[in-house]
Amino acid sequence: MSERLIKIYKQLDIHKIQEQLLVWGELSGHCAHCSAMGLKMEMPHCPQCRTTFKYIAFRNIKDHLPKVHKIIRDRADLMIVDYDDFKRVSGALKAEEFLK
């Protein structure tokens, strides 16, 4: 099989992503919307704010490549977002809003 992981760029609203993003660290995740901690990857929504997760970002994608394959197989409802891109764009938007 010649299928491999490859990045694809798509224009999305950063605010919509943040409202529905599960950020995965080393052992657990947190909700980008309400900052609830200790979430499991299998959770379809945040137990605290009830946000349905449509996106997931890994703080260190290279350490979690087996999990990425599992998500693609088991959680096709989740779109994988590059964490560095997310932080860069959301930081730039915060700076723009602050300077207004």
Image (spheres, rainbow, N blue to C red):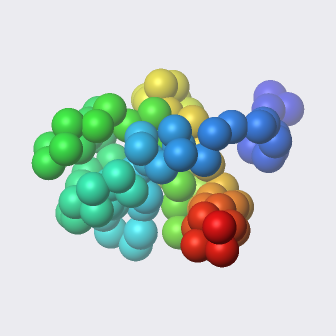
Q: In the image, is 76 to the left or to the right of 33?
A: right
Q: Which image quarter holds the N terminus?
A: top right
Instruction: Work out whether 49 lies above or below 34.
Output: above
Q: Residue at x 53, y 61 (%)?
A: 58
Instruction: Indicate the position of residue 28 as horizontal and vertical percent values.
Output: 30, 63
Q: Residue at x 42, y 41 (%)?
A: 20
Quadrant in the rendering for residue 6? top right
**Which residue extends farthest top?**
77
Can residue 91 be seen here? The reply is: no
**Which residue extends farthest front?**
100
Instruction: Indicate the position of residue 9 as horizontal and vertical percent values.
Output: 81, 42
Return the residue nearer the eye: 17 or 40.
Answer: 17
Q: In the image, is 43 to the left or to the right of 66?
A: left
Q: In the image, is 58 to the left or to the right of 99?
A: left
Quadrant in the rendering for residue 26? bottom left
Instruction: Work out whether 60 lies above or below 41.
Output: below
Return the residue nearer the eye: 70 or 8.
Answer: 8
Instruction: Indicate the position of residue 82 as horizontal and vertical percent values.
Output: 66, 56
Can residue 30 be seen here? The reply is: yes
**Count of marks overlaid on the render:** 0
Q: Which image quarter holds the C terminus?
A: bottom right
Quadrant in the rendering for residue 34? bottom left
